[in-house]
Amino acid sequence: MPDDSPGFVIAVYLAVCPPGSSSCLPGSGVTPLLRAKMAFVDTDPTTPVPGQRQAVILSWTRPG
């Protein structure tokens, strides 16, 4: 995903696969139970501290 932030926000897409599924990637034939767009934010971009990032749900959907 394109990101024009100064480096202290990381955005990711997550998919929750059904139990027993090895993958629910596009083309796998398995529909995810939930999809979410998340942002992980460092409070201090000059010295980020792993484990101290804020997790923010930007959007979510239940496909299918």
Image: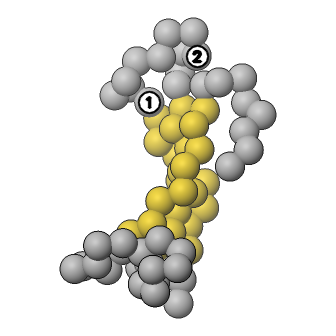
Residue found at the far bottom of this picture? 64
Side of 16 where 1 appears, left or right:
right
Q: Position of residue 5 (x, y in %)?
A: 73, 30
Q: Residue at x 54, y 32 (%)?
A: 41
Q: How is the image coloured?
A: secondary structure
* Residue 60 x %, y %: 56, 67
Residue 27 position within the rendered picture, expressed as x and y whole percent measured from the top left: 52, 79
State the residue at coordinates (53%, 21%): 43
Q: What kind of residue is marked 2?
A: Pro
- Label 1 and label 2: CA atoms lie apart by 10 Å
Dividing the picture into quarters, in which one does residue 9 lie?
A: top right
Q: Is residue 52 left or right of residue 22?
A: right
Q: Earlier in the sequence, mark 1 or mark 2?
A: 2
Relative horizontal placement of residue 16, taking residue 54 as reference (left or right): left
Looking at the image, which residue sits at the far front? 27
> Callout 1: helix, strand or loop?
loop
Q: Residue beneath label 1, please?
A: 53
Near mark 2 (Cα within 10 A), the count class, few <14, some 14-19 or many ≥20, is: few
Residue lying at 37% horizontally and 24% vertically, measured from the top left: 50
How many marks can you see? 2
Residue occupying the point 72% across, 39% down: 3
Disc 2 target residue: 45
